[in-house]
Amino acid sequence: MTERALQDLLDALRRLPGVGARSAQRMAFHLLQHDREGARRIAAALRAADEQVRHCERCHTFTEGSVCPICLDARRDARLLAVVETPADQAALERTGSFRGLYFVLMGRLSPLDGVGVRDIGIAPLLERANDAALEEVIVATSFTAEGEATAQLIAQALSARHQSHAAGPRCAGG
């Protein structure tokens, strides 16, 4: 039988994507046997992130302020808005250095099999953001999976319906 604190650590590590029982055990045993300082640093960093990181009021990515540095950057092209599924997708696009517009992070994608529906992703705030007068083009950059394609189709339809009900609005690309 495993001690309670050790079992709690194993259970916590297993919550991470791709980490099963054996991987969690290897990580826990390594930290406890060889790197107690590393374990303390991880614990402190998780605690700080939990307390300080929130969603950007404009794009919904993770940030420590109310608005993220990308949204605050006056050098970004406010005419372009890339819609991505996750902050990891946004970071990957940023690493390329090829996109200088702004972002909207859905924080997920449609996945009926996993119980993720329209209300579980950021469609309503995206439509509000699409009302920005400076916005000319929305680039839907969802994944090439069935769920990502369904999400892109939903976004395109919602933006198209909104565009038809308003005299002018952003053009939707991608999806």
Image (spheres, rainbow, N blue to C red):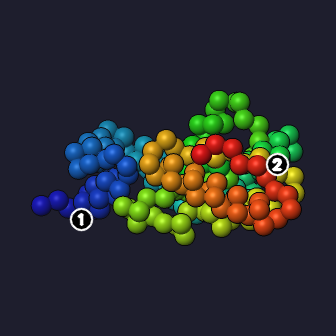
Q: Can residue 25 be seen in this view?
A: no
Badge 2 amino acid: Glu
Residue 8 or residue 16, whichever sits in front: 16
Badge 1 amino acid: Arg
Q: Is residue 133 visible?
A: yes
Q: Are marks 1 and 2 in contact (CB under 8 Å)?
A: no
Residue 113's place in the image compared with 141, above or below, is below
Residue 1 or residue 134, whichever sits in front: 134
User: Picture coordinates of residue 96 (x, y %)?
Assistant: 65, 29
Q: How crowded is mark 1: few (under 14 residues within 10 Å), some or many (20 or more)?
A: few
Residue 98's place in the image compared with 105, above or below, is above
Q: For the residue labelled by badge 2, is the local secondary structure a helix, a strand or a loop?
A: loop
User: Picture coordinates of residue 132 (x, y %)?
Assistant: 83, 58
Q: Which residue is depicted at the point 51% across and 53% down?
A: 150
Q: Which residue has dot 2 on it?
A: 136
Q: Which residue has dot 1 on it?
A: 4
Measured in 3D between alpha carbons, the distance from the residue under mark 1 to the one under mark 2, in whole angstroms, is 56 Å
Residue 8 or residue 157, whichever sits in front: 157
Q: Which residue is depicted at the point 12% across and 61% down?
A: 1
Residue 89 or residue 56, whichever sits in front: 89
Q: Which residue is depicted at the point 77% across and 62% down?
A: 164
Q: Earlier in the sequence, mark 1 or mark 2?
A: 1
Q: Residues within 10 Å of mark 2 (few under 14, many from 20)?
A: some
Give residue 113's quadrant in the image.
bottom left
Does residue 113 appear left or right of residue 33 in this picture? right
